[in-house]
Image: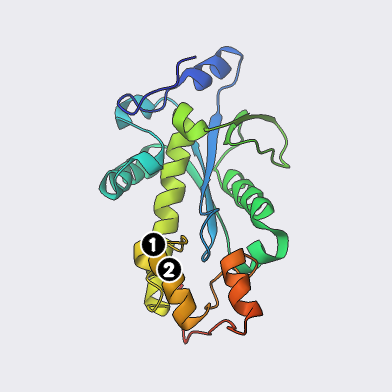
Amino acid sequence: MTTPGKSTGASLYLEQRLARSGCKRICGVDEAGRGPLAGPVVAAAVILAGRSRRLGLIQDSKQLSPKKRELLFHKLMADCEVGVGVVGEAQIDRINILQATIEAMEQAVRALPGAVDCLLIDGPIRLSLKGRQVPVVKGDRISRSIAAASIIAKVTRDRIMRELDRSFPKYGFARHKGYPTRRHRQALARHGPCEIHRMSFGPVKELRVNGREALPSASRGL
């Protein structure tokens, strides 16, 4: 199989192969937000069905501009079956980020309006759901269904972080979305962590060990 390039987007090769084996409702699953120091991890499940060809170029959300992601987000929400799962920072700290990602993915699949014949899952991940599952390493670059899920998850999470920025304006969440950028690390060092930071993550945990406890907010805004 040829890995699709940036100009052609993700392909339907895996979906077509599964369709030939009898699968009709094929669902792509992906997440956004495993790496940030703050905020939730968000997963999406998308069934393209026969509508994907009219959506235009679909590829890994990380390869798209914010404007293009938003445009495709609206098209996907209008034309496809979509489920979304969100697991917050407190649960991430309780069960670790991998298990929280799995939980968010399972929420997303369960949120779909109907049953699924096969799941195409980004990365070497298995869900505790019945039915056929195909883990696909770098799946958001290969499968159009997974790429579509990556767009839904990314846009949804970015919107959450922009909203949280209103309650925690000192940290710049609207700009870096909680990822460990230089600006974010500087804000952490200056103000200490806030209540939406992932306290189990190294840079935040280190601050807590050194006496910088989480700062509460007047309102979460969500």
Residue lying furthest left: 67
Q: Disc 1 or 2, which lies upstream in sequence?
A: 1
- The residue at the point 66 percent across, 51 percent down is 98
Query: Mark 1 against mark 2, which lies toward the viewer?
Result: 2
- The residue at the point 50 percent across, 17 percent down is 16
- The residue at the point 35 percent across, 45 percent down is 73
Spot occupied by residue 104 in the image (x, y as percentages of width and height):
60, 52
Marks 1/2: CA distance? 7 Å
Residue 9 lies in quadrant? top left
Spot occupied by residue 199 in the image (x, y as percentages of width and height):
62, 71
Which residue bears the numbered disc 2?
184
Which residue bears the numbered disc 1?
176
- Does residue 47 appear in this view? no
In the figure, is residue 41 to the left or right of 55? right
- Does residue 131 appear in this view? yes
Residue 90 lies in quadrant? bottom right
Helix, strand or loop at disc 2? helix
